[in-house]
Image: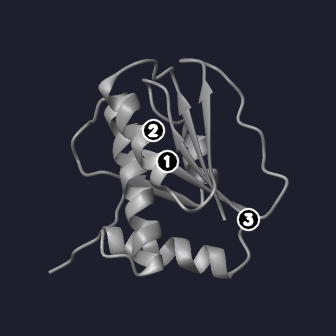
Amino acid sequence: MLLHVIAHGKIGRSPEAELVARYQKRMTWPVKMTELPDSGGKIRTAATPSKTILLDERGKHMGSAELAETMGIWRDDGIREARFILGAADGHSKKDRADADLLLGFGKATWPHLLARAMLMEQLYRATTILAGHPYHRSG
């Protein structure tokens, strides 16, 4: 299953960009990164069976194992692409939130956009290692 991270804004050369690249390089699942302008920018509908996940402060708070389990179910059900979308500064529209398959939150705090992107990549890497039985994720 392709993990497609779609984010508004350019990450440029930053410590967060280094983290994103580090986790992307480690990933054994295919990963695609798409950057859209800070405002506007169209997100095309996927041509294959896909899931749309919006990162949203009002989203569901999932532990790493729960995210991994969800991704494993999607993969096993034939979903070809999981699209993780980070919104612009004003977040997502009501329509986009209503149309999403999952609203995913990283807690009640508001996170800087670039840091949220790095956190998402780490969680995607962690989820794929959980599914692979790799010891990276240590739960107690």
Residue 77, quarter of picture: bottom right
Horizontal and vertical percent position of residue 116: 35, 39
Instruction: Residue under label 2, please give it.
Output: 21
Q: Is residue 20 above or below residue 97?
A: above
Q: Amino acid at mark 1?
A: Lys
Mark 2, secondary structure of its residue: helix
Mark 1, secondary structure of its residue: helix
Please name the residue shown 42% across and 48% down the image.
23
Quarter of the figure with the C terminus: bottom left
Q: Amino acid at mark 2?
A: Ala
Please name the residue shown 42% across and 70% down the image.
129
Number of disc labels:
3
Instruction: Residue under label 3, please give it.
Output: 80
Q: Is residue 1 above or below residue 16?
A: below
Quarter of the figure with the N terminus: bottom right
Residue 59 visible in rendering: no
Query: In the rendered structure, are the residues bearing label 2 and label 1 in contact, judged by CB atoms less than 8 Å apart?
Result: yes
Horizontal and vertical percent position of residue 90: 44, 25
Dot 3 surroundings within 10 Å: few (below 14), some, or many (20 or more)? some
Asked whether 116 or 134 is in front, the reply is: 134
Instruction: Residue under label 1, please give it.
Output: 25
Sooner in the amino-acid sequence: mark 3 or mark 2: 2
Q: Amino acid at mark 3?
A: Arg
Please name the residue shown 67% across and 23% down the image.
41
Horizontal and vertical percent position of residue 5: 56, 44
